[in-house]
Amino acid sequence: MTNLDHGATTVSSRALNALLDSWRASSAPGYLALADRIRLLVLDGRLPVGTRLPSERDLCAHLGVSRTTVASAYAALRDSGHVDSVRGSGSVVRLPARASVPRPTTTEGLLDLTKAALPAVDGIAEAAQRAAGRLGAYLDDSGYDPVGRPVLREAIAERYRRRGLATSADQIVVTLGAQHAIALLARVLVSRGDRAVVEAPGYPHAFEALRGAGARLVPVSVTVDDGWDEASLMQALRRTSPPVAYLMPDFHNPTGATMPAEQRVRVLEAAAAEGTVVIADETMAEMAIDDRRDAPRPMAAYGRAVSIGSVGKSLWGGLRIGWIRAERPLVDRLVRARSAGDLGTPVLEQLVVAELLGDFDRVLEARAGHLRRGRDRVVRGLREQFPSWQVPSPAGGLTTWVGLGAPVSSQLTLAARREGLLLAAGPVFGVDGAFERFVRVPFSYADSDTDRALAALRAAWDGIDGVQAPASPLLAEVV
């Protein structure tokens, strides 16, 4: 159920009219056409769960229709479970309750594309051998390392400096991957009941970490074509004054959008005015495919922000090394709080990553070539086999956010599983189950896996009716 409270984001009649677009072209009765279009905006996440709709009086005046039309449309949305209305509080977007079902307990024999990941980069074994040779110098102390070895912290700081952001090693905390970094920041910065601005669609494990710290999520729309809904983002910051806003400004997962430099400045200025700490997840920041030279600088180069990074996407997911870049007072708080959850990052893995960061530009060039070939193969294959789908060709990252043209994502992923393929359905990336019209498809896998996935998708698509998604979708695990 949606929480009806004073912090809900409101969509104006003017803004809703722009989103409704050509709703009048439908042959259905006016109130049904209006309700159907609003319902579609909800399912696509363009109207995030928790958004307060305009009053009936304001909307009918702006649309030039009778109040009966708008009242009947809102009633239809209440009946279908897409709106809650409370006297004195207005009408707020929600999604119908979804029954939970067990997740698959095994993926044996299945091609698992729920993870946007790359195989290990060449040279890891050799780097591990060199690191092991240096390990003796570190064996005299306890080995518990809550902040990170100086050699790795300096290597990470140097990457930031090369990207245009002055950074010293004492601004870096080395973590057990990016997910650990998000959870640690949430534990330090969020108190139970606080609001946290997040993207919709967005990174589901970040939602889990913030909720685990007691946050109430305030979603803001991000789309392939338009990027961040800046008006809604600014409104969410002003209305809720959240302690944190979690954003992925570079090759956003899953849409692939990148926030322009000018927008970064405006967002950070608005966040600073409300005392909000922007957590910029930059795990994808250096995963450019087409042109690495034009990438924006890190978010913190444009204002007050905390950066998260990791080598899970660039080097290998088996190296559980991430980091947080922050100002020294926050670094001190993070290190003090860390012992409640873990006692530090393994030393040997840190030394391995320090070895590999010395040749990181070559690694990124090789990754870009691999991803360019994979992206072109996936995009071409999907466009040829599914001409009705909208298949973006992103400039970076590891996935494409495919528009299916119908709310059947969960149904399609269920059918694909029967064909031996695991995919992440669109609702995985929504705060409350939106995005049934989308599916995320990675392009980071080998050609043979890509071809197998395309064949499985073709068989799965042919085997569904393309109209209704089941009430109890099976949602794959995702990273």
Image (spheres, helix red, strand yellow):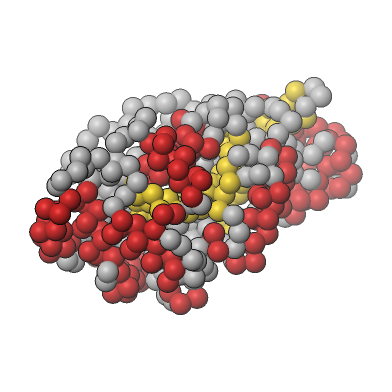
- Residue 388 lies left or right of residue 7; in this view the side is left
Q: Examine the rendered structure and indicate whether residue 298 appears above or below residue 432.
A: below
Residue 126's x, y, as percent? 12, 64
Q: Quadrant of the N terminus?
A: top right
Residue at the far front: name it: 140
Q: Is residue 459 visible?
A: no
Q: Residue at x 17, y 50 (%)?
A: 138
Q: Say which of 149 and 30 sits in front.
A: 149
- Residue 458 lies left or right of residue 45; in this view the side is left
Residue 95's x, y, as percent? 58, 33
Residue 162's x, y, as percent? 42, 71
- Within the image, what quadrant is residue 134 found in? bottom left
Q: Say which of 397 and 315 sits in front.
A: 315
- Within the image, what quadrant is residue 443 found in? bottom left
* Total marks in image: 0
Q: Residue at x 54, y 34 (%)?
A: 190
Q: Residue at x 15, y 54 (%)?
A: 137
- Residue 262 lies left or right of residue 457; in this view the side is right
Q: Is residue 375 visible?
A: yes
Residue 86's x, y, as percent? 75, 23
Q: Say which of 205 and 30 sits in front.
A: 205
